[in-house]
Each structure stands twice: as structure tokens, then as C-alpha cells.
Amino acid sequence: MNSMTRIPLTQLDAREPKSSGPQQARLPSAADVPRARDTQFKDTHGRRFSYLRLSITDVCNFRCNYCLPDGYQCSDKTEPLTLEEIRQLAKTFAAHGTRKIRITGGEPVLRQDLPEIIATLKQTPGIETVALTTNGYKINQHIDNWKAAGLDQLNVSIDSLDPQVFQTITGHNRLHEILTGLDRALELGLSRVKVNAVLLKGHNGDQLNRFLDWVKTTPITLRFIELMETGQNPDYFAKNHLSGESIKQQLLANGWQQKIRSKDAGPAQEFDHPDYQGSIGLIMPYSNDFCSSCNRLRISALGKLHLCLFGEQGYDLRHLMKENKQTELESAIRHLLQDKKASHFLHDGNTGAIQHFAQIGG
């Protein structure tokens, strides 16, 4: 887990993360960043950020072999963001163009105040969509409360529809329970239900047809995500990485049509088929244009802004998440966005500061 040391802005570079001493960053004042007529957060590459991924804990109770094969290891007992800090953060982002907030972890369901967090975000003026990404833990017990609190969209990680393979990947025999919860989510009429499956050559690389059979009668968006290299998984990555391009070619050869991407779409390439109730998405971070449509920023559970999933160690903004610090928080975010790179550096084998995805929710 990241420490709460505030890192000087001048000492951080997305390509070569560096450590720093215990000195506090000099964050800009309002005078440092001229106010533009267009108040939406944007970077120097013309990308606008309407989407915030907010981690509310880095604790996870699954042991997915591509993320936390040894389970969660606590290295910092600092408490995660409070409900009031989350409220102030949401107000600032909403005032500057953010319309969607996705709650992530670790595993966000482990926070008992999750319904209150959902409600707080949904009640923030300007926030149109509140989404949740979960490993599905006890989803069938909680989904009604989440929906009542204001949840709009749900993403659930299901890396295999084979119970034995699912248990091998995650360390848990919960597939049936999770699928039951998904059925309930569909019954409740959430605006969109997605299932994420990480492509793993040694585990689910030959299960495309099984997934497609499921999507034929299930109105979800199934997204295949290429395995990405992190600081802790280089050997696993080399053994299990599977390109999404091979899946794309199989889909096209079997009558699937690629959807036209909207101007504000995220990085997923999406496909549909007239004979299928569900659709397919592909997230391929190693494709050439993956970062050109970036529209999201990330806040860790400890209040650090991450400009890129595979970037710097994070910029501590937690001390600005207060009622009387909104102007300073806004100015700090604008200032930091000037350093956002045009792309990640995964193609160069540089995974940045991230050690595993539970740190900032992928």
C-alpha cells in the first residue's frame, strides 16, 4: 500500500517513479492556474475527464492469481477516505465536468458504509451515473440496497464460467452465488450490467464459446480485458498474456459488428450481433491508440490522484478534501493534469509504480 508521504511534484515522473523524503508538496494556489472559461478538467493533449474511478479501500478478500495470489497483505493501517472526504471530492469533480463516478477497491463491498457512499455520490449535483465494480462477494445479499441507494451501473469480475477454473483463478468457490446476484441485478433494471473477464492463456483462453453461449441469452456487456503487466507479475504476465486481437478476429469472422465509438467513449472496443441479447467489449491496452480516448482519472483509497493506471506513485490531495479547501483542490488537480502523459509506457515494459491492481482499482 502507498504511504501517505506527500511527494514533491517536481520529483515525480510517470516513466520513472521516484521515492521522496517526508517533505510536503508545494501545491499551486488559485493564482498559479488561470481560470478558463471552460471549467472542465482537461490535459495538454486535449483530453477531457468526465469519469472518475474512486477507490474506497485497497483491501480485497479474493486471491486472484493475476493480482493478489498470496492474498491481501496490509502494509499501512491508514484509514481510507471518509464519507465527508468523498463528498468534498465528488463536489469538486462534478463542478468541473465529471459526470460519472465508479466506485472501486480492492473490494468496495467490504466497506459497511457502501450504501451511504453510493447515496452521497448520487446526490451530488452534476453526477449523472454512479457505478460499482466488485468481485461479486455477497452481491445477492446487497444489490437491492445498492439500487435503492442510487446505483446505476454494475461491473462484476467473472474470469471463467467453469466453477473449477473460477476457483483456481480467484481462490473462492462462489461462482453460483455471483451469477445469482447478477440475475437479481438484471431483475432490478440497472441501466447497464457488465461482466469483466481477464484473458488468461493458461486458464480461460479456450473458453470463448462458453462465454458466447452465455451472452446469447443474457443481456449483459461481457468485456474481455487483456492481462496487463505490473511490478509483481512479470513472470505470470509472460506466461499468460493473450492478445485481444485474436478474440476480435474471431468475433468479426462470426458475424459480430463493431459499434461506432462515441466521441466520449472509453477505451473498450464494443461489438454486437443480431442473434445475441448481450454484447462483447474488448479492452486492449497494448493497442496503438488505447490512450487517445482516455477520459478518466483515479483517486486511491488514501486520497492520492493517479493520472494513469501505469504512471506515478500518486499525488496526495487528501489534506485538500475539506469544505474550505475546494478552490485549492481544484487548482491542484488542474496543475497536476499538465503533467499527464500522452500514453502509458507498457510497450516499453515500464509498468510505473503500480504493484497490483488492488492498489487503485484497475
Image (tube, rainbow, N blue to C red):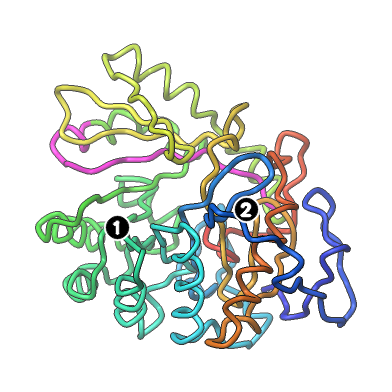
Q: Give the residue furthest to the top.
A: 253
Q: Identify the residue at image location x=54%, y=32%.
A: 242
Q: Position of residue 305 (x, y in %)?
A: 64, 66
**On the rendered structure, is 226 left or right of 159?**
right
Does 205 sit above or below residue 313? above
In the drawing, what numbered circle is on residue 348?
A: none
Query: Which quadrant of the figure has residue 128?
Result: bottom left
Query: Which quadrant of the figure has residue 316?
Result: bottom right
Does 175 sit above or below residue 260? below
Using the image as rendered, state which of residue 328 and residue 167 is in the foreground: 328
Looking at the rendered structure, the secondary structure element under dot 1 is: strand
Query: Which quadrant of the figure has residue 7?
Result: bottom right
Disc 2 vs disc 1: Cβ atoms closer than 8 Å? no
Q: Position of residue 231 (x, y in %)?
A: 72, 54
Label located before the other in sequence (2 or 1): 1
Q: Position of residue 134 (x, y in %)?
A: 37, 63
Residue type, mark 1 in image: Leu
> Which residue position holds label 1?
154
> Which residue position holds label 2?
309
Q: Identify the residue at image location x=77%, y=44%.
A: 350
Neighbours of disc 2 within 10 Å: few (<14), some (14-19), many (20+): many
Using the image as rendered, state which of residue 163 and residue 150 is in the foreground: 150
**On the rendered structure, is 36 left or right of 57?**
right
**On the rendered structure, is 35 left or right of 122?**
right
Using the image as rendered, state which of residue 315 and residue 213 is in the foreground: 315
Q: Which residues are magenta?
A: 213-230
Quadrant assignment for the N terminus: bottom right
